[in-house]
Image: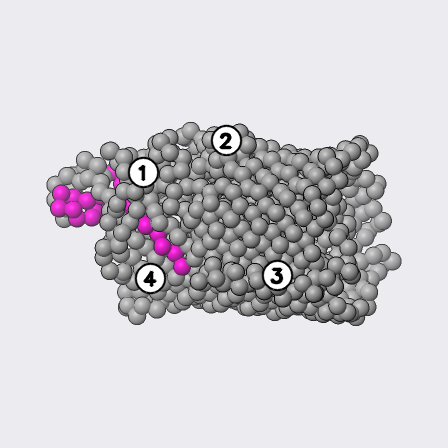
């Protein structure tokens, strides 16, 4: 059925639109950059608010904003947005915790955007002015973002209050294509390693004041690890109308994706076969309907009113087969004792004989259904104040979501398939959790940019945010009555900064900003160390959590040098301190744990970027140093340490490499043929669960990727890419846990293996 649906959509794109495509070709020229160019674009004006305003010149922005365009996506053929950011943006790192290419944990300056509920999210993600972090756990689903629809990406660093909740470390702002910016039709087919095949089609055009854009993506793969297939289906469409004063757009996204990511595996298992998985299945089905209506009206060249209204219907279903290690007595009765204290101990009162560890299979399913809705109204005005240029924007935003969540569990038997263990359900599914949550987020914000002199510019901004969370148990069980609760959070977050242009080729900047993250419904209902949760699988009546407060200082410089044909550079130094940081402490082998506040953490570092051109070679270098540390003494619960982990001030936060480097170049050998490559390096990192920094680290790694593009005939492009050219064995992260299948059961390093050497080829037709 899904294959038939894919063929139908593709047929509609190819057959019903050729006449329109020809008209679009006559009206617009191909404005794509030359083959091989990978340099980041020179952004003269950027949007510094969620909705487009009148625009701010980059030399008036007191932060190290980094940007990408649709041309960057086309030239490099990345699989998704997270891969694109990892390859091109300084201070971005990826931990492939799930080992599915569409379920990456992305870190920027040590702050996380992840699809996994329970992750300490610190980045906000916007698409055309809509915040698309999911309402239940603030997660980011990369597979729900049609990459072919992206027109531009701005990564705005710091605790920027204008972007609201969760902007502790930065905001990622996406803009999508329109029929005015993109004209014509393209169809692309590709395939290669891991049984991956993909089809992509897009069409755009305009006539008079009307424009339209449509793109469809389909991808199937077996996955490079065992038992890891995935299917992606994405559709994006936009229609619009504009004249000299007014612009209207209505966009729609449909996604229907089936992802399998079987996660970390014991080091001893990977030594035998790097394709092997520990247990399976671990399936996630994501479905999305997303409507967004945007409008703007320019009353004058200096006064712009903009607004949007949206609906986002998101459904998520999961099936997770686990091997649970538990402590039992001689009669196989479960004993509530830490795994690390179990083996060989005498049974406590009520138990029989000597205790031992036992492995049992368990199937766990979840269903999440979220209706998200909201809108923003924003007014921008440019004028003079004290005979100096002044630009001010004020806005009001509301984001709401209603979520129903259920979790069922069943006893399962374990069976061996190759080196892996699968689960087969043998018991009835029992409903463990059934909750309904509602979240209302209200925000009013202001930003003002004032030219003190022609060279010195002051920016100040702020946002007052209110978050209300309501949680209601749906089981009807009186024992769950205490789960019901209402939680309110509010705060005013300020920001300010200065820029100084010494010359046209040298700009200095510095600023301070604050933001906060309110606990999500998933976190508020899972904060009891005496009753851990299988995320996102069980919820309890818990003590309240405090919001996280982020404070960022940043200074830097940017400019250009007369070396070669074009050389642009930027450098930034930053420090972000989090008060009452939220973490998820894992306490059971199956991943169960609880959320807790800790006093203080800090991320500080340096970003350096260079890009330029020498003759027909375009090149770029991006380096990031991230020093992420605990700044208070803490005792953290642990699955492997019965007495907890003793964290000291200055200990590094696990999972965050200190150094990362990306160096790339493309050589246009001929006008229609280019060859390029990318070197990616990440330094070592501590295992998750080794917060006291006592164990061996996950080793550093370096990989080389190659790519080429050629246009042998008009309207035809061929491309190829090879990832991990030298077939390096490496890991992107790791965690401490017990290996349920070792003899005897013992603690072991679980690692996330990196993708081996792989290649893909594709053909693109343009009309």
Tags 2 and 4 in contact by the CB under 8 Å rule?
no
Up the image or down, 294 lies above or below 453; here it is: below
Q: Judge from the rendering whether residue 69 lies leftward or rightward of residue 138; answer left or right.
A: right
Q: Which mark is residue 14?
A: 3
Is 533 in the magenta?
no
Q: Kindly identify the residue that appears in the image at 32 percent across and 50 percent down.
A: 321
Residues under labels 4 and 1: Cα distance? 33 Å
Q: Earlier in the sequence, mark 2 or mark 1?
A: 1
Q: Mark 2, mark 4: which one is toward the viewer?
A: 2
Residues under labels 2 and 1: Cα distance? 22 Å
Tags 2 and 1 in contact by the CB under 8 Å rule?
no
What secondary structure is marked by label 2? loop
Residue that numbered label 1 is attached to: 419
Crowding near pointer 3: few (<14 within 10 Å), some, many (20+)? Answer: some
Q: Quadrant of residue 665?
A: top right
Q: Mark 3, mark 1: which one is toward the viewer?
A: 3
Residue that numbered label 4 is attached to: 433
Residues under labels 3 and 1: Cα distance? 45 Å
Tags 3 and 2 in contact by the CB under 8 Å rule?
no
Q: Earlier in the sequence, mark 4 or mark 1?
A: 1
Is 326 in the magenta?
yes
Quadrant in which the N terminus appears: bottom left
Residue that numbered label 2 is attached to: 727
Q: Mark 4, mark 1: which one is toward the viewer?
A: 1
Q: Quadrant of residue 561?
A: top right
Tags 3 and 4 in contact by the CB under 8 Å rule?
no
Q: Which residues are magenta?
A: 317-341
Q: Kindly identify the residue that appears in the image at 35 percent across and 49 percent down.
A: 281
Q: Kindly identify the residue that appears in the image at 43 percent across and 38 percent down.
A: 752
Residues under labels 2 and 4: Cα distance? 45 Å
Up the image or down, 459 lies above or below 367; here it is: above
Crowding near pointer 1: few (<14 within 10 Å), some, many (20+)? Answer: some
């Amino acid at each position: 059925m899904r294959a038939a649906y894919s063929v139908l959509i593709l047929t509609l794109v190819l057959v019903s639109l050729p006449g329109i495509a020809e008209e679009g070709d006559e009206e617009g020229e191909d404005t794509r950059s030359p083959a091989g160019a990978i340099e980041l674009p020179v952004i003269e004006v950027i949007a510094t608010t969620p909705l487009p305003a009148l625009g701010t010149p980059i030399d008036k922005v007191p932060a190290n904003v980094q940007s990408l365009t649709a041309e960057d996506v086309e030239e490099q053929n990345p699989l998704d947005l997270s891969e694109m950011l990892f390859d091109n943006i300084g201070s971005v790192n990826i931990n492939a915790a799930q080992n599915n290419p569409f379920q990456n944990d992305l870190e920027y300056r040590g702050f996380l955007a992840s699809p996994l509920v329970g992750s300490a999210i610190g980045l906000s993600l916007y698409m055309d002015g809509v915040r698309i972090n999911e309402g239940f756990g603030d997660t980011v689903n990369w597979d729900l973002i049609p990459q072919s629809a992206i027109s531009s990406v701005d990564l705005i660093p710091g605790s920027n209050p204008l972007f609201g909740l969760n902007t502790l470390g930065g905001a990622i702002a996406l803009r999508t294509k329109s029929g005015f910016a993109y004209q014509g039709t393209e169809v692309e087919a590709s395939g290669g390693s891991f049984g991956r095949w993909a089809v992509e089609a897009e069409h755009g055009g305009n006539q008079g004041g009307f424009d339209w854009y449509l793109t469809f993506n389909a991808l199937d793969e077996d996955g490079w690890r065992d038992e890891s297939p995935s299917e992606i289906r994405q559709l994006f469409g936009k229609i619009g109308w504009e004249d000299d004063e007014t612009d209207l757009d209505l966009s729609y996204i449909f996604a229907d994706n089936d992802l399998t990511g079987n996660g970390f595996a014991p080091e001893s298992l990977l030594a035998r076969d790097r394709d092997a998985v520990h247990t399976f299945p671990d399936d996630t089905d994501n479905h999305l309907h997303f409507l967004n209506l945007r409008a703007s009206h320019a009353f004058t060249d200096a006064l712009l009113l903009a607004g949007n209204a949206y609906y986002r219907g998101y459904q998520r279903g999961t099936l997770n087969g686990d091997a649970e290690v538990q402590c039992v007595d001689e009669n196989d009765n479960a004993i509530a004792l830490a795994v690390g204290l179990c083996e060989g101990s005498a049974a406590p009162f009520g138990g029989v004989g000597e205790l031992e560890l036992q492995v049992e299979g368990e199937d766990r399913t979840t269903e999440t259904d979220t209706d998200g809705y909201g809108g923003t109204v924003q007014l921008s005005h440019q004028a003079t104040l004290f005979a100096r240029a002044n630009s001010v924007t004020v806005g009001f935003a509301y984001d709401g979501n209603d979520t129903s969540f259920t979790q069922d569990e069943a006893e399962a038997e374990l069976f061996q398939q190759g080196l892996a263990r699968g689960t087969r359900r043998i018991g009835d599914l029992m409903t463990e959790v059934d909750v309904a949550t509602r979240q209302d987020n209200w925000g009013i914000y202001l930003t003002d940019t004032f030219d003190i002199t022609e060279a010195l510019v002051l920016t100040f901004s702020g946002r007052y945010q209110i978050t209300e969370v309501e949680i209601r148990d749906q089981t009807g069980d009186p024992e769950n009555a205490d789960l019901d609760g209402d939680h309110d959070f509010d705060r005013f977050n300020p920001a300010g900064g200065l820029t100084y242009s010494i010359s046209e080729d040298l700009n200095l900047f510095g600023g301070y900003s604050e933001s906060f993250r309110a606990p999500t419904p998933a976190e508020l209902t899972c904060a009891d160390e005496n009753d851990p949760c299988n995320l996102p699988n069980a919820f309890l009546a818990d003590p309240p959590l405090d919001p996280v407060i982020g404070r960022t200082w940043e200074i830097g410089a940017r400019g250009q040098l007369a070396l070669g044909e074009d050389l642009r550079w930027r450098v930034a130094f930053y420090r972000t301190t989090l008060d009452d940081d939220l973490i998820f402490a894992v306490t059971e082998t199956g991943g169960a744990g609880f959320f807790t506040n800790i006093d203080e953490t800090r991320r500080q570092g340096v970003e350096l970027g260079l890009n330029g051109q020498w003759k027909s070679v375009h090149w770029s270098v991006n380096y990031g140093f991230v020093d992420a540390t605990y700044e208070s003494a803490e005792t953290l619960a642990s699955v492997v340490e019965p007495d907890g982990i003793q964290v000291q001030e200055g200990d590094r936060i696990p999972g965050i490499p200190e150094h990362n480097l990306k160096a790339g170049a493309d050589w246009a050998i001929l006008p229609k043929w280019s060859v390029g490559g990318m070197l990616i390096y990440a330094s070592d990192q501590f295992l998750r669960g080794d917060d006291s920094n006592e164990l061996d680290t996950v080793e550093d790694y370096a990989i080389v990727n190659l790519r080429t593009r050629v246009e042998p005939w008009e309207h035809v492009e061929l491309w190829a890419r090879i990832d991990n050219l030298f077939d390096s064995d490496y890991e992107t992260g790791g965690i401490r846990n017990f290996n349920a299948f070792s003899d005897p059961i013992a603690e072991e390093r679980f690692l996330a293996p990196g993708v081996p050497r792989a290649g893909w080829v594709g053909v693109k037709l343009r009309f």
